[in-house]
Amino acid sequence: MIKIVTDSTAYLPEEMVREHDISVVPLYVHFGTDAFKEGVELSNEEFYQKLKEAPELPTTSQPSAGEFHEVFAPLIDAGHEIITLTI
């Protein structure tokens, strides 16, 4: 079976993610020294609230290769092929 892996910048609707069993690897959003996994540790509503209150604009950073490996490894071990779509 072919599995799809993407990152959180795809902003796929949750229903689509569930329906097609898509794996989403979150990017990090940094507000000052605080880092949050997009969509996991920081919802859209929380993001916009923090954006209003933050003295500086947030930055982002990519997931590590290890974080992608954590998603890929079980899929490969289960015999799946993977299509990956990221920024």
Image: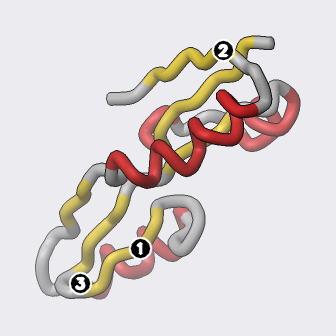
Please give left or right for residue 65 compared with residue 82 in the image.
left
- Element at label 1: strand
Outermost residue on the right side: it is: 19
As measured in the structure, the alpha-carbon distance from the residue carrying label 3 to the one carrying label 2 is 42 Å
Quarter of the image for residue 77 reads top right
Classify the position of the C terminus by image quarter: top left
Mark sitting earlier along the chain (1/2): 1
Circle nearer the viewer, 3 or 2: 2
Q: Residue at x 46, y 22 (%)?
A: 85
Of residues 18 and 58, which is closer to you in this image? 18
As measured in the structure, the alpha-carbon distance from the residue carrying label 1 to the one carrying label 2 is 30 Å
Residue 26 vs 57, above or below: the answer is: above
Mark 1 belongs to which amino acid?
Phe
Task: Rate crowding at label 2 as few (under 14), some (14 to 19) or many (20 or more) other CA atoms within 10 Å.
Answer: some
Mark 3 belongs to which amino acid?
Ala
Mark sitting earlier along the chain (3/2): 3
- Element at label 2: strand
Q: Position of residue 5 (x, y in %)?
A: 58, 30
Are the residues tagged 3 and 2 within 8 Å (C-beta)?
Answer: no
Mark 2 belongs to which amino acid?
Glu
Of residues 60 and 78, which is closer to you in this image? 78
As measured in the structure, the alpha-carbon distance from the residue carrying label 3 to the one carrying label 1 is 14 Å
Circle nearer the viewer, 1 or 2: 2
Q: Name the residue tied to disc 3.
A: 54
Quarter of the image for residue 86 reads top left
Q: Residue at x 36, y 52 (%)?
A: 63
Quarter of the image for residue 30 reads bottom left
Q: Name the residue tied to disc 1.
A: 36
Q: Residue at x 33, y 77 (%)?
A: 35
Q: Name the residue tied to disc 2.
A: 81
Are the residues tagged 3 and 1 within 8 Å (C-beta)?
Answer: no
